[in-house]
Image (cartoon, helix red, strand yellow):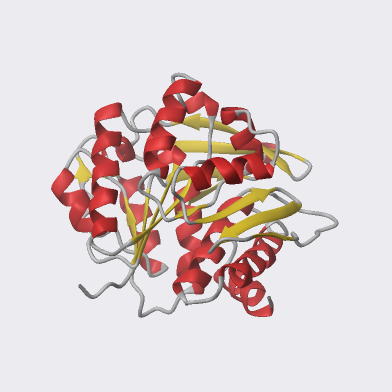
Amino acid sequence: MEMGGIASVGECMLELSGGSGGNWRMGHAGDTFNTLWAMRALTPETIAADYVSAFGDDPFSADQRNFFADHGIGTAASPVIPGRRPGLYAITLAGAERSFTYWRADSAARCLADDPQALEKSLEKRALVYFSGITLAILEEPARKTLIAALETARENGSRIAFDPNYRPRLWASPEAARAAIDAALAVCDIALPTFPDEAELYGDKDLQATMRRLAEAGVGEIAIKNGAEPTLLSAGGGTVLIPAVAVADPVDTTGAGDSFNGAYLAARVAGLAPETAARRAHKVAAAVIQVHGALAPFSVLREAFAEA
């Protein structure tokens, strides 16, 4: 089967940012969309890029799909759900560090796995499929199982599956539920891109090496453990290596840094670059992203950083 195209599965929300003086900017963002944004910027236009989700039938949902299309991102066979709408979140900043307030109970994306045939169609013949722990967390248990089954089918048909556990406690009923779902996801993934503080919180890992051992024992063959401004621990093909982060003296906004790392890393891997080269390029891109406001850096910023690495 000829493989081509990339897909990211999850929830893209309306983003309110820059709310000083009561004046807010509205954009579109969410962890898996932020990652696809970077992949779209850093892969040739001949490679299709699709955001696999579910959308509402309201004007904001239509604007969101138009925004995707304007930037070369499709939606494959993602359904439009009557009466649903996008989730919404607002970013508040303390210096460069951010916090989030969410409104997402009626999010259409919670229905992304309600049509198994549409989901499988959206994932067909993909060179790479990406998803996250937040993708899992917004779904009910039966829908999580449907998604994992669709990912397993895509993998059996030749797709590489990439996953960031991205643990957010408030989205889960319990740590036990999160661990069960994330463990099931790890069983069908080829590339894991976790963040160490998340793994330490959920699994009690004492250090990066403990996280690396656990993921390797789960059968993941390629692992890049992010750790903020500290080096990334990378394992692919047997050995491990620390890849230093790129220092930024005065970051503007850390929103989307890890997501952009993931997108740059995966774009490099889709292009056939070695894992170590991919991680170095990913750090350069993440460093560029935290020097601009918002989760979605301009394509030109992403491309310049990626080319310089």
Location of residue 64 in the rendering, given as x and y in whole percent from the top left corner: 37, 53
Using the image, determine if residue 148 lies above or below residue 122: above
Instruction: Please identify the residue farthest to the top as the structure is shown.
Output: 174
Using the image, determine if residue 211 lies above or below residue 252: above
Location of residue 259 in the rendering, given as x and y in whole percent from the top left corner: 56, 53
Of residues 151 and 60, the one drawn nearer to the viewer in this rendering? 151
Q: Residue at x 20, y 38 (%)?
A: 114
Location of residue 201 in the rendering, given as x and y in whole percent from the top left corner: 62, 29
Q: Quadrant of the N terminus?
A: bottom left
Location of residue 74 in the rendering, given as x and y in whole percent from the top left corner: 31, 63
Q: How many marks?
A: 0
The image quadrant that residue 110 belongs to is: top left
Q: Is residue 282 left or right of residue 12?
A: right
Q: Residue at x 23, y 34 (%)?
A: 83
Of residues 58 and 22, the one drawn nearer to the viewer in this rendering? 58
The image quadrant that residue 245 belongs to is: bottom right
Q: Residue at x 73, y 59 (%)?
A: 291
Asked whether residue 285 is in view, the answer is yes
Q: Quadrant of the C terminus?
A: bottom right
The image quadrant that residue 45 belongs to is: bottom left
Q: Residue at x 60, y 62 (%)?
A: 297
Asked whether residue 295 is in view, the answer is no
Using the image, determine if residue 155 lies above or below residue 268: above
Instruction: Please identify the residue farthest to the right as the structure is shown.
Output: 249
Q: Is residue 34 left or right of residue 297?
A: left
